[in-house]
Amino acid sequence: MSNALALMQQQIMALAADPAVYLVVGLVVSVVIAIAAGVFSPRSLRSPDRLAADQQPGNMVLIFLAGLAVWILTPAIYAGYRSAPAATRGEVHISPAEQVMLSAVAAVAALIVLVVGNVAYRRHGLTQLGFDVRRLLAAIPQGIVGIICIMPLMAWISIGAVKIWELLHLAHPAKHELLEILDKTHDVQVARLLVFTAVVIAPVYEEVLFRGHLQSVLRHLLGRPWAAIVLTSAAFALVHPWWTQPPILFLSLCLGYAYERRGNLWLPVVIHSLFNGISILASHYMGR
């Protein structure tokens, strides 16, 4: 009897040590929560058009393009400035600290452009997008539930993507460039700025740009929430490294759905922030 109990305990311990068990349990919990929340209901996307009837989408398109341009051109301009003294050497070296700073500055500058553009050219524009600070608190518990649903599925998709790249013999970095910097840097200030950028600055800017502007314009023009979600998610995935695009596409679909479901832009911001924070914890701190 005692031998049988000992064997059972060993089997339970071996099972508990298997990561696949947690992935399966997480997947089941994720699906159950999603069903309970009505995610699969065809009527779950009920938020109204975020452009008023008397508003033209032209201003939003211009604001979106301006914010996108500032985000892309800020690092390029800095690299061009740095290349002038290095012209004789034929190469430009940007340090990890500069990369982190550029990432933060570009996102903040672009976010300012988006906010100022809405204030100047769209009356109550940010409120219509659901970007009202009074709605932040309501988004926090909803975002926690959302990330619980999303993370197990993200894990499975990430594993599948890795297997596909291996089958296709496509080599890729083990980690995102910024996570590599976080692993290697000994500068505490750089590490803090990187984490703050990933958890706070980037989620706010990227959600205001992609969900708040691009998805809202597409929904207004197409009249179909899912078409807007899919097209926006494709664009969002394309600005990320190619080897991360399958899980990022899925994440973006979830963010777009959450936005259309609640009409609260803070909800995808919270989910995005939690995802980035969990990714940093899993990669840098728990992965050591």
Image (cartoon, rainbow, N blue to C red):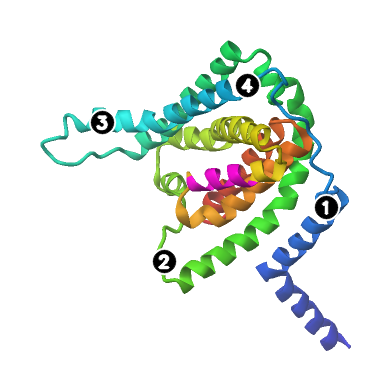
Q: Which mark is residue 170?
A: 2
Q: Earlier in the sequence, mark 1 or mark 2?
A: 1
Instruction: Label 2: state its secondary structure.
Output: loop
Percent x, y for residue 182?
A: 45, 44
Q: Which residue is mark 1?
A: 33
Disc 1 residue crowd, few under 14, some 14–19, many 20+, Cα 10 Å = some
Instruction: Label 1: state its secondary structure.
Output: helix
Q: In the picture provided, is 115 more to the left or to the right than 184?
A: right
Can you say which quadrant of the picture contains the N terminus?
bottom right
Q: Earlier in the sequence, mark 2 or mark 4?
A: 4
Q: Nearer the viewer, mark 4 or mark 3?
A: 4
Q: Earlier in the sequence, mark 3 or mark 1?
A: 1
Q: Earlier in the sequence, mark 4 or mark 1?
A: 1
Q: Which mark is residue 56?
A: 4
Q: Which residue is mark 3?
A: 80
- Residue 23: in magenta span: no
Quadrant of residue 72 in the image?
top left
